[in-house]
Amino acid sequence: MKCKEIRELMPDLAAGLGTADTEMETHIQNCGACAGELEEFRKTMALLDEWTAPEPSPYFDTRLRARLREEMASPAHNWLSWFRKPALAVSLAVLMVLSISLIRTDREAHPVGKMATVAVEPGTAVGDLQALDKNNEIYSDFDLLDDLQVQKDVSANP
């Protein structure tokens, strides 16, 4: 057997819940690590056998019964008790949405970092890029016109 398999069975062996077969006994006699670990388990189990649980307070039962009577006598929660937490969550969500929308509209009303536009001569790289940016919708429709021309050519020449 392997050490890993022996280690899984060691708590039961140390507590006396199981018995070791010949193969396990041979392994434990030949393997010093497993023998030491089994001995440690046995010492731990012996200490646990000596341990006694502390006695509960003599007034524990009396206080428990009194607490149960108080809980039974308290009025049942009304319909608002389950409604409060979701209502609070919804109101906070609405508050967040409103604050975000106010911040966005404030930014649009007072733009930060707008730079003055400088006139750029046409024919330069910057001028061409600005022209493409301004006329984006017009240039995107050219592809549509090209597709229509191709369809007319195909239908005219069957």
Image: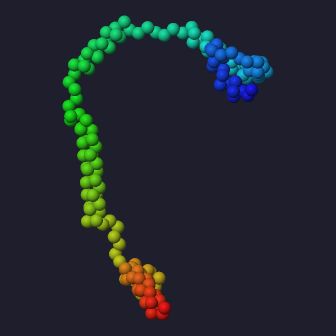
Give the residue drawn at x 57%, y 12%.
48
- Front residue of this view, candidates 111 and 39: 39
Q: In the shown orientation, is residue 67 left or right of residue 49?
A: left
Q: Quadrant of the N terminus?
A: top right
- Front residue of this view, candidates 84 and 78: 78
Q: Is residue 156 above or below residue 100?
A: below
Q: How many marks?
A: 0
Give the residue drawn at x 26%, y 62%.
105
Residue 42 shows in this picture = yes
Give the residue drawn at x 34%, y 75%.
116
Question: Which residue lies most toward the bottom here?
Answer: 157
Residue 154 on image: x %, y %: 47, 89
- Front residue of this view, candidates 66 and 149: 149
Quadrant in the rendering for residue 32: top right
Q: In the shown orientation, is residue 32 left or right of residue 17?
A: right
Q: In the shown orientation, is residue 57 left or right of residue 6?
A: left
Give the residue drawn at x 26%, y 65%.
109
Quadrant in the rendering for residue 142: bottom left
Residue 80 on image: x %, y %: 21, 35
Residue 123 shows in this picture = no
